[in-house]
Image (tube, rainbow, N blue to C red):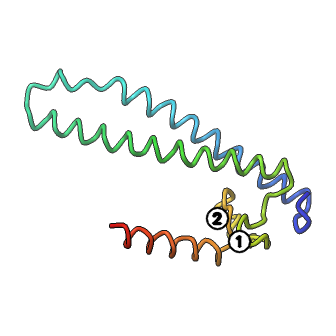
Amino acid sequence: MCDFMTEDQLAYYTGQIEGHIAELEERLNSQASQAIATDTNEMADEIDRASIEEARRLELNRIEHDKLHLRKLRAALRRINEGDFGYCESCGEQIALKRLQARPESRYCLECQSTKEFNDTHVFRRVA
């Protein structure tokens, strides 16, 4: 059980996360239907087809982003149920409540997240 949060706070975050999950699932269902329904063969003009294909590509990118966000939110619910919610996966310290308020799916405290992003950026630059 999370030692630094009350039951009410955990219930609040559970409700927030479940609300985000429901919203994402609804949006994903709508996006998938729209992406499938678009037919570029109906367009005779090459420029129109290119425009439709670009819009489809952007929509598919949004769908992938939403799927990733959904997985992160579901993982946050699992952490709440397991009693690990609100603790940094790297250092084990408490994640600030303001950070959890903004991003309840956060797995790292601000300092560890910054370090992770810095390292990821520098590894990418070395490889590229």
- Image quarter hosting the C terminus: bottom left
Q: Which residue is drawn at 49% across and 69% down?
A: 120
x, y (%) of residue 6? 91, 62
Give the residue type that dot 2 points to. Ala
Residue wearing tag 1: 98
The number of numbered discs placed on residues in the rendered structure image is: 2
Q: Nearer the viewer, residue 11 or 110?
A: 110
Q: Residue at x 31, y 41 (%)?
A: 57
Q: Nearer the viewer, residue 62 or 89?
A: 89
Res 61 → quadrant: top left
Q: Residue at x 23, y 36 (%)?
A: 53
x, y (%) of residue 16? 72, 51
x, y (%) of residue 126? 38, 72
Contact, mark 1 vs mark 2 (Cβ under 8 Å): yes
Q: As drawn, is 32 to the left or to the right of 117?
A: left
Height in image: 11 above or below 87? above
Secondary structure state at the residue bearing disc 1: helix
Q: Residue 102 carries which label?
A: 2
Give the residue type that dot 1 points to. Lys
- Image quarter hosting the N terminus: bottom right
